[in-house]
Amino acid sequence: MNAQKIIKTCSQVYIGFSILSLAYVSISSIWNPQATMDLVSTQLPNTDAISSIRGIYGGVGLLITFLLIYLLLNNIRKALFFLLLFWAVYSISRLITIWVDGPLGSFGSQWLIIESTFSILGFVLLLLYARIKKETNVSQQ
């Protein structure tokens, strides 16, 4: 029973940390899209570019944030699965960039490590969470 509580709490912390991270980038991108792009030394030359960053990193990021809050409150397993895919796709995208365009700079390399770690952590938590759910169902029968 204690292991179940630890795994559930670790899963909630992981999901919560992801929510806070995404919410921060989203709100920052809505408020000041250029500041988001300054992280990768890219100027936004016109209002269409500004609008795109505000919409993708800001608006879509907030939608993902709200979805994760809903899943945290209603279905931790689905939240873990979503975050596993979310962080893994970011990692895969960076690996494709390395393969197609060459080495990443320090920003991209740092985030490749972070996103890969988050995807692995999500995978491990998903496996552990599925295991405790299975044990709970077996013990209730």
Image (cartoon, grey):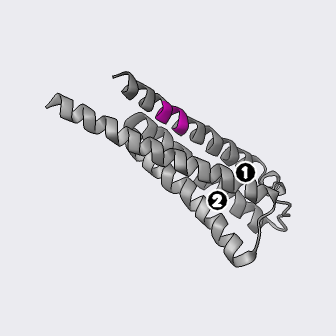
Residue 53 shown left or right of residue 136 in the figure: right
Residue, x 81% and y 57% (percent of image)?
Answer: 106
Seen in the picture, residue 135 relative to 35 is either above or below; the reply is above
Mark 2 element type: helix
Do tag 2 and tag 1 residues touch (Cβ < 8 Å)? yes
Q: What amino acid type is highlighted by mark number 2?
A: Ile
- Evaluate whether residue 75 shows in this view: no
| Residues rendered magenta in the picture | 10-14
Q: Nearer the viewer, residue 35 or 135?
A: 135
Distance from the alpha carbon under mark 2 to that under mark 1: 9 Å
In the picture of the structure, the residue carrying the numbered disc 2 is 56
Seen in the picture, residue 3 relative to 109 is either above or below; the reply is above
Residue, x 61% and y 60% (percent of image)?
Answer: 91
Q: What amino acid type is highlighted by mark number 1?
A: Ser
Residue, x 38% and y 39% (percent of image)?
Answer: 129
Q: Position of residue 24 (x, y in %)?
A: 68, 42
Q: Position of residue 119 (x, y in %)?
A: 54, 51
In the picture of the structure, the residue carrying the numbered disc 1 is 29
